[in-house]
Amino acid sequence: MRNKKVHIFILFILGAVIGASLYFAYPFMDSIDLGLDLRGGTQIVLKPTQEDIDEVTEESIEQAMFIIRERIDALGVSEPLITRDYTNNIVIQLPGVKDPDRAMEVIGRTAQLEFRILESIDPQTGEAELGPVLMTGDKLASAQAGYDPTGRIVVTMNFTSEGQQEFAEITAQNVGEQLAIVLDGEIQSAPVIRQAITGDAVIEGIGSLADANDVALVLRTGALPVDLSIEENITVGPTLGRDALTGGLYAGAIGLILIAAFMVVYYRGLGLISVINLLLYIIIFWGVLASLGAALTLPGIAGIILTIGMAVDANVIIFERIKEEIHKEKTARTSISQGFKHGLRTIVDSNITTLITAGALYRFGTGPVRGFAVTLAIGVVISMLTSLVFSRTIIYMLAGFRRVATPQFLGVWKRRGLS
Amino acid sequence: MILRDTNFNFVGRKKIWYLVSMAVILMGVIGFFARGGFNLGIDFLGGSMLEVQFDQDVEVGQVREVMEDIGFGGAILQRTASDQYIIRTTTRDVETKNMILDALDDNLGIQRPPLQDRNVMPGFGRLITRLALIAVGISIMGILIYVWIRFEFRFGAAAIVALFHDVLITLGIYAIFFREINTATIAALLTIIGYSLNDTIVVFDRIRENTSDASKMGYANMVNKSINKTLSRSINTSLTTLTPVIILLFIGSTALQDFALALLVGILSGTYSSIFIASQVLVSWNNRFPKFKK
């Protein structure tokens, strides 16, 4: 058995951990980031759909994410979270979005702007024959929506100085032709070039000012380097998540009280230690979750609920072992050290299998399921630590006192076996 | 102590336990075919769902009528509260969504925006399904290898049998009651795998520790003794784990209740299988390929 100084040192370290956890976990409800499914908001999953798969590179996805961020900022949506999963899908979370449908429209748009000569229109099918691409949208300096002098809705595009020069050359060479302005494969307008244009270009024929604003926004932020399609979109209202959160917290709290009652009745003194252990577990768990900045999701709540029950398991294994040793007529001290010695291996083995599962869930899971994996893994590790460090130290320390280290305290009801 | 020094004969009746488990699994299989497969959610199949809060209580028939009028007679309706419904349709665009919401609002009165709006492309659903299967596969492989390293191959094999047992029973319950299976269900299933193993390993650990007794009392008796010695732990841990899960089943939101159901079935099955299946498979294995005295 280790000496008193070591025990006090361990408790000191533990106290520091708990202090740090309380620091991170305070204030209780605001310290944790809530996932979209709990706080409400929109999640969009975008998948690159380029025909030529070579074009979808790490770099192009990064660049697309950068452009998307600019578009979201331009929309004025707060706290966007843009991540990429390992299948190269871009996952966008927008907690504060007001108009999810518009956000989706703006974010997913490739915004490939092309200037081409309209050569002819098939009179039967109405299909346009377009010449080669003369210029693209990458030489735009900015774009604004507004009205032209005749009151029509237009998007005015300002070129960079280089673009201005190039546009003037193109228009000078093609006087009398129709210049098609093509956005994402669709001809927006095709005015006849009357003379070389040295100033701005305009897009006409847009239905509403809101649409024109969106077009201007995507032109300003530039074209996405890859085509993206919306594979999944979820919008959750704030009430649904709030109900889930309160339900989960109540279930956790009631569960906790019932478990505590059971442990104290069944294991007595040891049970009391396990209840304190469980409270410490929850404080440290909350602190770790807050300090990691991991978001709490709906399945994450289920994960917490599950780990509360599992957290006492390590204690149950050890307590049962201690009782068994007491029944073998061993002293309280020996029983305790034997209980921990035998219990340790079981606890580690049984928890590692849960960690393997959590790892697989994290690697291959999506969205909320990942949140579940994180809470499960954190829960397993912390419950092992608290029961093997806290419970163990306290029980060893108490075992030093004759009055405490009785079979009754260790949960054995009949007075027997203490030599 | 209530469960101190028990000496139940678990091993002697192992054929009964095998039959009980097979019967439950068979019921699940029958349920599966009778229902024409699982009730897979849009996570896997693709499609759309709207969760709508009505201004007052409405009956399924009323909602169905409105949906039929606008050409969505095939929509799946699920009542989550007396004035809340989940409406599932095939994948649709924003205009169609607004048409559905307008029709419901005009006829029955709903709150806007809806509680939940979700759209999954079928291709994405297939990807999710594939990833879920990979996750299950990797988990099982990882666990088998771990148990094999820490114990022996036969322990790993027996643990995997118990694990499949628990997953099959849980899936069977989902088939029989035609509960929706979604990504959260898969997460729950994987957790069950972890929990079931956790339970099994505690018993196995004791069997490993007592292996030396096998030469005296025989392998079957040694296993039986080990099960009895760990019985009160198995039951107590199941109780403490089940307590919050059961509470969640009653007071949680719809999504949490789904999760809690999977966990409830899995925990019960996991506790059962660690005692009545995993350990018995070890005995059967030793009977077939004797390494220790029977």
Image: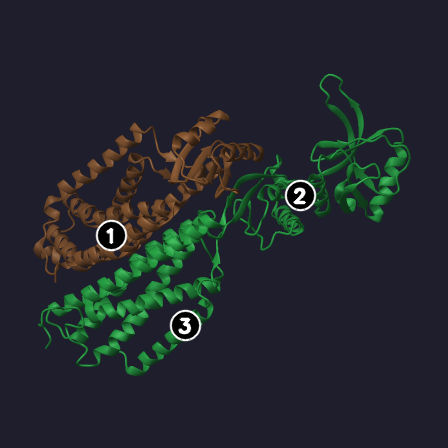
Task: Specify the quadrant that holds the N terminus of chain B.
Answer: bottom left
Is residue A223 found left or right of A20 in the rendered image? Answer: right
Q: Is residue A362 visible?
A: no
The residue tagged 1 is: B200
Do discs 2 and 3 share a chain? yes
Q: How is the image coloured?
A: by chain
Counting from the top left corner in percent of width and height, residue A25 is at 44, 67
Colour brown maps to chain? B
Chain ID, mark 1: B
The residue tagged 3 is: A17
Q: Is residue B266 above or below residue A304?
A: above
Element assignment for label 1: helix
Counting from the top left corner in percent of width and height, residue B233 is at 20, 59
Which amino acid type corresponds to the residue marked 1 in the rendered image? Thr
In this view, the mark in front (2 or 3): 3
Counting from the top left corner in percent of width and height, residue A288 is at 43, 64
- State the CA–CA distance, disc 3 to disc 1: 33 Å
Residue in front for this viewpoint, A266 or B66:
B66
The residue tagged 2 is: A225
Please state the total of marks drawn on the protein image: 3
Q: Residue at x 50, y 40 (%)?
A: B118
Task: Quadrant for residue A287, please give it.
Answer: bottom left
Colour green maps to chain? A
Q: Residue at x 40, y 55 (%)?
A: A246
Counting from the top left corner in percent of width and height, residue A367 is at 47, 48
Which amino acid type corresponds to the residue marked 2 in the rendered image? Pro
Q: Residue at x 20, y 81 (%)?
A: A401
In this view, the mark in front (3 or 1): 3
Chain ID, mark 3: A
